[in-house]
Amino acid sequence: MRLLSLLLVLWLIVGVIAAGQRDYYSGSVTNCAKASTIAVTVMAGPLNYAGVNPKIHGCRVPQPSK
């Protein structure tokens, strides 16, 4: 269990580094698509260096009912 936790933390750290190298943290424009792209990149972890380039282009947020 300890090894699995360590691997998960390392996986996410590599994803955070990959998102930083792609300049996803720069700029002040924050929207659903940018936040989703950062989250997917972090979750992809080391796969980013194997050619995976996840991007989210549009978000559809449910509207409140009337």
Image: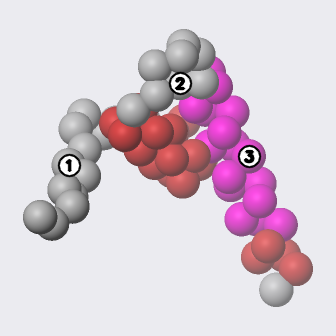
Q: Do callouts 2 and 1 mark residues in contact (Cβ within 8 Å)?
A: no
Residue under label 2, please give it: 24
- Callout in the foreground (2, 1): 1
Give the numbered dot on residue 60.
1
Give the numbered dot on residue 13.
3
Q: Residues within 10 Å of mark 1 (few under 14, many from 20)?
A: few
Q: Residue furthest right?
A: 2
Q: Residue furthest front?
A: 66
Give the numbered dot on residue 4.
none
In the rendered structure, which amino acid carries the disc numbered 3?
Ile
Per the model, the C-alpha gap separating discs 1 and 3 is 28 Å
**Nearer to the camera, 47 or 15:** 15
In the rendered structure, which amino acid carries the disc numbered 1?
Arg
> In this rendering, is residue 62 above or below 22?
below
* Residue 15: x %, y % from top left: 62, 43
Q: In this picture, which residue range is highlighted in magenta? A: 6-22
> In this rendering, is residue 30 above or below 9?
above
Occupied quadrant, residue 22: top right
Helix, strand or loop at disc 3? helix
Q: Earlier in the sequence, mark 2 or mark 1?
A: 2
* Residue 20: x %, y % from top left: 64, 25
